[in-house]
Amino acid sequence: MSTPTGEYLAATRLWSIHWFENVGVSLGTPLVGQFTAGVGEFFGDDLHEGQPVRVRFRWAAPGTYNATGEQAFSIDNGTIWETNWTQIVHRSTASDSQHQ
């Protein structure tokens, strides 16, 4: 399991996102990017099954109570992307927590 941690660099206006790998206790290769019009795009280089890949992570919050995340790999430096992971996050409201 991986857990993200981020750092905002005000001088460059870029975010650096690291995935903390629970196995082996190490920080993964950072993905660097920014938010534009409510969508964050972050890029980095990594290995997948021993093969170099370009990694893209997108984060969007199209509504007040939900957000989506998507990870994709590219083996041709970003010409073609293959999405391999998505998530949808829903924020609970105060009334939701009273009924659980």
Image: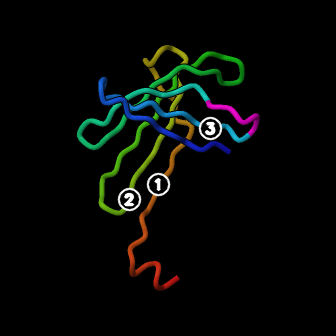
Query: Which callout, 3 or 1, points to the residue nearer the camera?
Result: 3
Question: In the rendered structure, which segment of residues is drawn in magenta?
Answer: 23-27
Q: Which residue is disc 3 drawn over? A: 20
Q: Nearer the viewer, residue 25 or 37?
A: 25
Secondary structure mostly taken by the magenta-highlighted segment of the chain: loop
Q: Position of residue 47 (x, y in %)?
A: 64, 21
What residue is pinned by disc 2? 66
**Which residue carries the number 1 mark?**
88
Q: Position of residue 78 (x, y in %)?
A: 44, 19
Report the residue that reaches farthest toward the right: 24
Q: Is residue 24 magenta?
A: yes
Q: Nearer the N terminus, badge 2 or badge 1?
A: 2
Separation of disc 3 and disc 1 at Cα? 20 Å
**Is 50 placed left or right of 18 in the picture?**
right
Q: Amino acid at mark 3?
A: Phe
Judged left or right of residue 12, residue 21 is right
Q: Earlier in the sequence, mark 2 or mark 3?
A: 3
* Quadrant, the N terminus: top right
Mark 1 and mark 2 in contact (Cβ < 8 Å)?
Answer: yes
Q: Amino acid at mark 2?
A: Asn
Q: Is residue 21 magenta?
A: no
Q: Earlier in the sequence, mark 3 or mark 1?
A: 3
Q: Nearer the viewer, residue 54 or 16?
A: 16
- At mark 1, the secondary structure is strand
